[in-house]
Image (spheres, grey):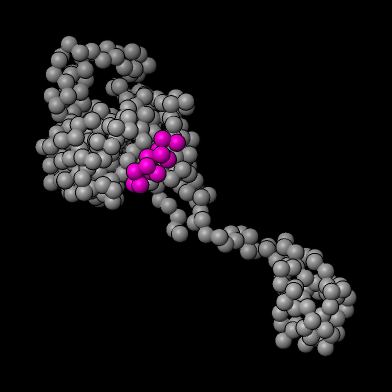
Amino acid sequence: MTQRHTFIIAEVGLNHNGNLDLARESVAAAAHAGCDAVKFQNFKTEDFVRDRTQMFTYKSQGTEVTEPFFDLCKRNEFQPEWLGPLKSLCDEIGVELISTPTSIDGIEDLRRAGCTYVKNGSDYLTHPPLIRAMGQSGMKVILSTGMGTQDDIDAAVLALGAAYPDNAVLLHCTSAYPTHPQDINLNRMVRLQSHYDCAVGFSDHTEGSIAAVQAASLGAAMIEKHFTLDHELPGPDHWFSSTPGEMAELVSDVRQAEVRLGSGDLVPAAGELETRDAFRIGVVAEIDLDTGHVLGAGDFAFRKPGSGLLPRDIDDYLGRTLVRRVPKESPLSPEDFG
């Protein structure tokens, strides 16, 4: 069994603030932090909101801001012409470019750009036409299940069609920012894996890296975490997103968790092999045993070191003749019997 490598995604989302240069810097910083992928949202605002009187309140730069939801989204749209240069940058520095579209045209933009993955937003979990198009795109589908019931997830999985299960990952997500410990429910991720027999992951909206490490230990194939260059940048998501330093710490913590999990093979650890013989109980001569002696019940004892015969082996050697002398307290070995 090989050591698992959890695929870690830096979710830039809106945190490019509508600026291509900031998007480029975010890609480079996420790669430097050790992430495997960087994710954006190539939505079109009109796909999901047109009422400009619908207000949205959020925290930004330490204050509460209220503004039209349409204006917030429109200002932070990912422009289609960014895909080419950002995909080239990702290819150059060795990370995947992932995005969340809100239309079939958006899916096609990602496919044409050569993206390997496409991801829904949890708000689109109950939008079968979009999910069906994702499943038919030829890209691997990351299906976020935030806010979803089992019926919602069943319908979405059905919509994935042939992409499920081999080209799909079901992402456990709690759509609360930040997510409180009592709402994380990582056992829901475990249930997704057992119920849908599919690779699963965790969209982590908690503070810190503890939940991500726990998810990796529970079998997450993928972890997504919001990412920003600076908590003090203006916008709704920067304050709870991970900075480059925080993301690097998360990546390191997850990688160490993977090392701690190991291979699962039923063999001693490398460090144990160095001292195993000294620590284990072996079979030693209770008295001086001469060449030609027939081993009997009173001739041996169980003591350290365990460098020769083990206690479990002794029945195989009772009644056998020694071919060389074994001094008292010396380990008995198979070679002593020829």
* Viewport quadrant of the N terminus: bottom left
Going by the image, does 45 lie left or right of 197? left
Which of the two residues, 269 or 182, is positioned nearer the viewer here? 182
Q: What residue do we see at 77% from left, 70% from top? A: 283
Which of the two residues, 28 or 241, is positioned nearer the viewer here? 241
Question: How far from the left and from the top, in percent, is residue 193?
Answer: 38, 43
Q: Is residue 260 visible?
A: yes
Question: How far from the left and from the top, in percent, is residue 302?
Answer: 80, 66
Going by the image, does 270 lie left or right of 10? right
Q: Is residue 20 magenta?
A: no
Q: What residue do we see at 35% from left, 47% from top? A: 197
Q: What residue do we see at 15% from left, 41% from top? A: 133
Q: What residue do we see at 21% from left, 26% from top? A: 76
Q: Specify the principal SS of the magenta part.
A: helix
Going by the image, does 65 lie left or right of 247? left
Which region of the structure is painted magenta? 187-200
Q: How many marks?
A: 0
* Viewport quadrant of the C terminus: bottom right
Question: How far from the left and from the top, in percent, is residue 50?
Answer: 13, 18
Question: How far from the left and from the top, in percent, is residue 83?
Answer: 17, 40
Where 333 sits versus 38, above or below? Answer: below
